[in-house]
Image: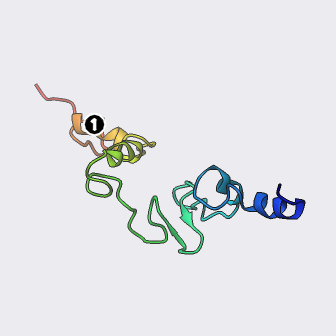
Amino acid sequence: PVSARAWLLLSADMGKAGKGTGSFGKRRNKTHTLCVRCGKRSFHIQKKKCSACGYPSARTRTQGPGAGSLFYGHEAKAQRRVTTGTGRMRYLKSMARRFKNGFQKGETKKKASK
């Protein structure tokens, strides 16, 4: 039989050595926090860089084809989440109507003379 002291030493290490279930209890440090630009929990605290949008880089990180895996199609789903049409489109939503009317200025139209 195992002594009480030896049992305590054995039980302290059991299930904590590998990467599986037992070791998840020891994970308490955050590597990522919220990004101020995209709002996702993707800002790496030590690297000071967002893995989703690339902040603080001026150019926003692309989510399109070729940005990530070439085999699994994850980039296609990411593209759908951030592409044109997923936001307010403050400028672009009026473009079709303005194009249809020929991009009129502010003047009123003159009456057609007979």
Amino acid under disc 1: Ala
Pick the front one: 105 or 85 = 85
Pick the front one: 42 or 13 = 13
Give coordinates of residue 81: x percent, y percent. Answer: 41, 43
Direction from residue 16 to residue 71 in the image, left or right: left
Pick the front one: 24 or 40 = 24
Direction from residue 14 to residue 39 in the image, left or right: left
In the rendered image of this protein, does residue 5 appear above or below residue 112?
below
Q: Residue furthest top?
A: 114
- Label 1 Cα crowd, 10 Å radius (few <14 / some 14-19 / many 20+): few
Quadrant into which the N terminus falls? bottom right
Can residue 91 be seen at all in this image of the molecule?
no
- Residue 39 location, quadrant: bottom right
Pick the front one: 114 or 100 = 100
* Secondary element type, mark 1: helix
Give coordinates of residue 63: x percent, y percent. Answer: 35, 54
Give coordinates of residue 89: x percent, y percent. Answer: 40, 44
The residue singled out by tag 1 in the image is 96
Q: Tell me how many marks there are.
A: 1
- Residue 84 location, quadrant: top left
Give coordinates of residue 61: x percent, y percent. Answer: 38, 62
Quadrant into which the C terminus falls? top left
Direction from residue 77 to residue 2 in the image, left or right: right
| Residue found 33% across the figure and 56% down from its top | 68
| Residue found 53% across the figure and 74% down from its top | 47
